[in-house]
Image (spheres, rainbow, N blue to C red):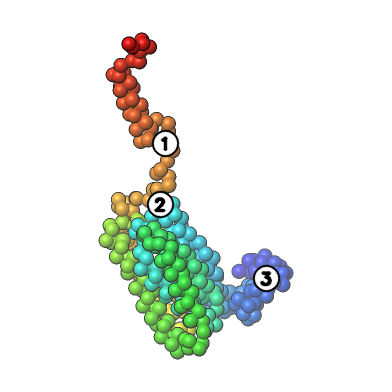
Amino acid sequence: MESVRSVLQPITHKLPAPLVDAGRSLIGPVCYKTLIVDIDPFASPECLKLAISKGLGIGIIAASSIVKVPQLLKILNAQSADGISFLAYLLESGSYLISLAYNVRHAFPFSTYGETALILVQNVVIAGLVLKFSGKGLGSVGAWVAGLVAVGMALAREDIVDLKMLGYLQAGAGVLSVASKVPQIWTVWQQGGTGQLSAFAVVNYLLGSLSRIFTTLQEVPDPLILYNFIAGFVLNAVLALQMLVYWNSPASKKTESKKLNKGYVAPGKGPSSDSAAKGAASYAKAAAKSPAPTTRRRG
């Protein structure tokens, strides 16, 4: 350890002031001195666990900014929402909206819940696409977004929803979070395949919920949030297991883009060309049977 310390300390002792300030605000002055300045992680196990928790939290937030992008691209590419449950996104978005308001109003560290806001935005977009490709009009999409905005504004106001009521809602959000996975699990089982469900999103949810159990134990003394993540991890594990079981099923392979399937129709190959050729042939036959015009005068 001394050899590592002798190499790193000349660097850590000369870090730019903005990095020093960020490190102290993230893990606290005492832990910053122990872990960064002194480079003695074994002197304080609590500081080490806090640093790991902060690192996991930042990593989860960074990953959450793109966690639903593959799912979004699959829907757009296939022009289909097969295998995607709108009810699952409705319940999950409601749960995330309540949890976001609960964490913000209790002033918990952003590193313990930041992904909630980013995933919520992606959920709103994906749910809107599910409505669109399910044959619902733009009015349904607008009502979906407007409803979430109205609920979010109400949750943010103390005069409408006080902290006691918000605590009850957070308990309910845990139930919603669990319930949000059930329609998706049921849809996959019923269709016998995962359809347009993104394996990337499922795996990231599984790893993220497991990491959140650790960060919550370290930084958030709130059993409501902890139980929420534990239940979410269990059901995310079920979804991940379904991805493995149905990976090669026929229903999971229907992911070709409808845009790409239209393809380029070469001259003389498409149905319109065939119709034109048949029409030309019929006209030629009719012309051959009709008598040729004559120039002889009558009378």
Q: Which residue is mark 3?
A: 19
Measured in 3D between alpha carbons, the distance from the residue under mark 2 to the one under mark 3, in whole angstroms, is 44 Å
Outermost residue toward the front?
299
Number of the label disc, if any, that sits on residue 78: 2
> What amino acid is found at the position of numbered circle 1 in the picture?
Val
Disc 1 crowd rating (10 Å Cα; few below 14, some 14-19, many 20+) is few
Could you tell me how far apart the alpha carbons at marks 1 and 2 are, in whole angstroms?
Answer: 20 Å
* Residue in front for this viewpoint, 22 or 107: 107
Q: Residue at 48% of width from left, 84% of height from top?
A: 221
Q: Secondary structure at mark 2?
A: helix
Tell me if mark 2 has few (under 14), some (14-19) or many (20+) residues whose alpha carbon lies within 10 angstroms of its own.
some
58 sits to left or right of 15: left
Residue 231, image x, y percentages: 37, 74
Residue placed at 33% from the left, 25% from the top?
283
Q: For residue 234, what is the image quadrant?
A: bottom left
N-terminal label among 1 and 2: 2
Residue 122 shows up from this direction: yes
- Residue at horizontal 43%, vertical 87%? 165
Q: Which one is closest to the eye, mark 2 or mark 3? A: 2
Image position of 137 (left or right of 31): left
Query: Which residue occupies the foreground of this view, 32 or 116?
Result: 116
Q: Quadrant of the C terminus?
A: top left
- Residue drawn at the location 38% of the way across and 62% of the way down: 136
Q: Is residue 202 visible?
A: no
Question: Which residue, given by chain and number where applicable, does mark 1 sit on?
Answer: 265
Q: Position of residue 31 (x, y in %)?
A: 61, 78
Front label number (1 vs 3)? 1
